[in-house]
Amino acid sequence: MQRAGADYIHVDVMDGHFVPNLSIGPMVVKALRAHTTLPLDVHLMIESVDAFIPHFAEAGADIITVHAEAGAHAHRSVQLVKSLGKRAGLSLNPATPADAVDYLIDALDLVLVMSVNPGFGGQGFIANQIGKLASLRRKIDASGRAIELEVDGGIDAATAPLAIAAGADVLVAGTASFQGGAACYAANLQRLRGGP
Ligand code: ZN
């Protein structure tokens, strides 16, 4: 994916509690770190997140994103990420309003809009998240800070232009990036960026 032109390697971490699936832990992030110089964008879909943040930081994550819904203390989690010298992201599930970022925006480096319910790949894009992206774009611009607006879930050649038009500047794509195998990765990424 690095050779194919990707900007980030997005890593979905799931705990079987916050989301109904289990995936990888810090050991796998550490193994990935050895294989790419791209920023590792680690998306923590887990509860009790604060206990795990230092492990992912140590494993080589560059961006650590926590969910607004994963506990009562998103502010503390974001501060913990920052204190470890990493870029901090806040992720919003489809039912969480854009206003959830209001009292955290001064600390954030990235806002991640979930355009599917987190847990599994291959789901369809939830169209009303476009309005939330546009609303977050306005908040980020008003903050004057360099905060990336990322969208994750159901991104393909049809939905990517809608997300970009609404103000997203980082697109996460699993299925649409990997389809067709390694020979197709570069063309797949180019199509998501609006190329032919
Ligand atoms: Zn993700």
Image (cartoon, helix red, strand yellow):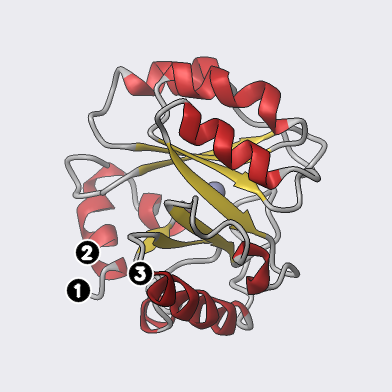
Q: Quadrant of residue 22?
A: top right
What amino acid is labelled 1 in the image?
A: Gly
Q: Quadrant of the N terminus?
A: top left
Front-most of 166 and 161?
Answer: 166
Give me the C-alpha separation between circle 2 and circle 3. Answer: 29 Å
Q: Position of residue 162 (x, y in %)?
A: 43, 82
Q: Position of residue 2 (x, y in %)?
A: 22, 40
* Residue assigned mark 3: 144
Mark 1 / mark 2, whichever is N-terminal: 2
Q: Position of residue 146 (x, y in %)?
A: 33, 60
**Label 1 Cα neighbours within 10 Å, binned few <14 / some 14-19 / many ≥20:** few
Mark 2 / mark 3, whichever is N-terminal: 3
Q: Position of residue 10 (x, y in %)?
A: 43, 43
Q: Considering the numbered disc 3 on the image, is that residue within a helix, a strand or a loop? A: loop
Q: Is residue 15 above or below residue 94?
A: above
Q: Name which residue lies at 29% across and 60% down.
A: 188
Instruction: Say the numbered circle drawn on residue 9.
Output: none
* Residue assigned mark 2: 190
Asked if the residue under mark 1 is in contact with the one under mark 3, i.e. CB atoms within 8 Å, the reply is no
Total of numbered circles in the picture? 3
Viewer-nearest of labels 3 and 1? 3
Q: Quadrant of the C terminus?
A: bottom left
* Residue assigned mark 1: 195
Q: Is residue 78 above or below residue 144?
A: above
- Report whether the residue tagged 1 is closer than 8 Å to ligand 1: no
Q: Considering the numbered disc 1 on the image, is that residue within a helix, a strand or a loop? A: loop
